[in-house]
């Protein structure tokens, strides 16, 4: 049993080495030195086989106890070193001010759109949606807009299918919608009257960009269909919504106009302190009218039974008046110095 005399000093040496390992790599090295396949402690264990039957149980017990001690010491040191490795190299100064993330803001057009939707929801309108890539039928034909109407000209309109001349071809061309009025048709095709919807979205025209024009802008469309709907319903609704949006001093004026999908048709001018500030008495703001009987017939509504009104206006225009913005292009530049102001 002479090798047992070596057990205690070897164990003490191993424990000391494990404790003094300064990092995980050094610890693994130490583990190998003692407990690896060719380690010193492993060698000692192998000698157990050389003992006699009588000596072996007691010796085995001692060796096993020592091994458990070493393994515990190894695990303890390993968790200490792992914790040390996970700590930041530099101490943390908890007294430093925190890093704040600045809050973003809704785009002014989104703010105005939300306000418009809120105003119309108060009086029972739902929001409808339609595609930005439309066909000529929904954008023009169904709205009683004849094939030779200038809005259908290639000069005015972004056609998607190349090489189709809109006024002459029989196959329906697709185009970027020139107005949200196409959504009126989609809604009426889908549901029976009564209808009370607004629809907001992007529209596209071949306009050159300047302070008041942009090839892409946003419109809101309104459509109300029921029995015995009159121009006074239209006027009352428009007045209510503009007062909600622009303040209670708003005045609204209707001027006779022409749209192929309404009869009679009007342009809406409005006046308010904001308009006066711009040095004007009235500003033209929207188109509207009583839905043309032919439009009802096109969607299968009986024009003898149903009547209704529709309107459309530009959202940028509203936002420009409301916030005193003098160039429409500012909306699309995504310059935070501009956007932060609203
Ligand atoms: N679609 C017209 C435009 O883009 C606006 C408009 C006028 C919409 C009269 C209507 C309407 O619904 O009845 O200029």
Image (spheres, rainbow, N blue to C red):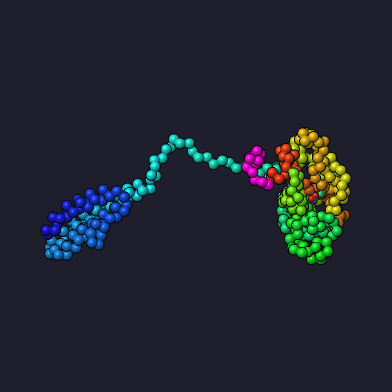
Q: Quadrant of residue 165?
A: bottom right
Of residues 6 and 294, which is closer to you in this image?
A: 6
Residue 95 at x, y percent in the picture: 44, 35
Left or right: where 9 falls relative to 301: left
**Quadrant position of the N terminus in the picture:** bottom left
Q: Position of residue 39 (x, y in %)?
A: 23, 59
Measured as percent of width and height from the top left, residue 181 is found at: 78, 53
User: How far from the left and from the top, in percent, is residue 236?
Assistant: 81, 41
Is 234 within the magenta? no
The answer to whether residue 249 is visible is no
What residue sits 32% from the left and 52% below the top?
A: 24
> Is 164 located above or below residue 114 in the figure?
below
Horizontally, residue 247 falls left or right of residue 76, namely right
Q: Considering depth in this image, is 333 or 194 the residue closer to the camera?
A: 333
Q: Which residues are magenta?
A: 332-342
**Residue at coordinates 82% horizontally, 47% vertically from top-left?**
288
| Residue 215 appears in the rendering | yes
At horizontal 17% and vertical 55% (from top left) the residue drawn is 7
Give the answer, above or below, for where 173 lies relative to 72.
below
Q: Which residue corresponds to the image point at 75% horizontal and 38% vertical from the top-left?
A: 246
* Left or right, 129 with reference to 265: left
- Look at the image and tell me in which quarter the C terminus lies: top right
């Amino acid at each position: 049993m002479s090798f047992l005399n070596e057990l205690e000093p070897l164990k003490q040496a191993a424990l000391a080495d494990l404790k003094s390992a300064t990092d995980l790599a050094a610890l693994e090295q130490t583990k190998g030195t003692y407990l690896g396949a060719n380690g010193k402690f492993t060698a000692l264990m192998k000698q157990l086989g050389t003992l006699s039957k009588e000596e072996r149980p007691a010796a085995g017990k001692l060796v096993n106890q020592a091994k458990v001690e070493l393994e515990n010491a190894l695990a303890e040191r390993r968790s200490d070193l792992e914790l040390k490795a996970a700590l930041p190299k530099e101490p943390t100064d908890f007294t430093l001010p925190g890093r704040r993330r600045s809050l973003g803001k809704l785009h002014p057009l989104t703010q105005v759109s939300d306000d418009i939707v809120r105003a119309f929801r108060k009086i029972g309108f739902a929001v409808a949606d339609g595609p930005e890539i439309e066909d000529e039928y929904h954008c023009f034909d169904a709205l009683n807009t004849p094939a030779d109407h200038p809005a259908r000209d290639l000069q005015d309109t972004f056609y998607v299918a190349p090489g189709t001349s809109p006024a002459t071809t029989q196959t329906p061309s697709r185009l970027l919608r020139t107005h949200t009025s196409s959504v009126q048709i989609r809604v009426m095709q889908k549901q029976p009257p009564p209808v009370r919807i607004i629809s907001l979205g992007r529209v596209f025209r071949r306009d050159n960009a300047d302070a008041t024009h942009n090839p892409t802008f946003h419109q809101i469309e309104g459509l109300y269909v029921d029995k015995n709907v009159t121009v006074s319903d239209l006027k009352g609704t428009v007045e209510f919504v503009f007062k909600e949006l622009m303040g209670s001093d708003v005045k609204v004026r209707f001027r006779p106009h022409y749209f192929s999908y309404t009869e009679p048709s009007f342009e809406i001018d409005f006046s308010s302190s904001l308009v006066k500030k711009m040095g004007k008495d009235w500003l033209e703001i929207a188109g509207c009218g009583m839905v043309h009987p032919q439009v009802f017939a096109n969607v299968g509504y009986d024009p003898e039974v149903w009547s209704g009104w529709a309107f459309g206006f530009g959202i940028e225009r509203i936002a420009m008046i409301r916030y005193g913005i003098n160039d429409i292009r500012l909306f699309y530049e995504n310059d935070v110095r501009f956007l932060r102001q609203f």
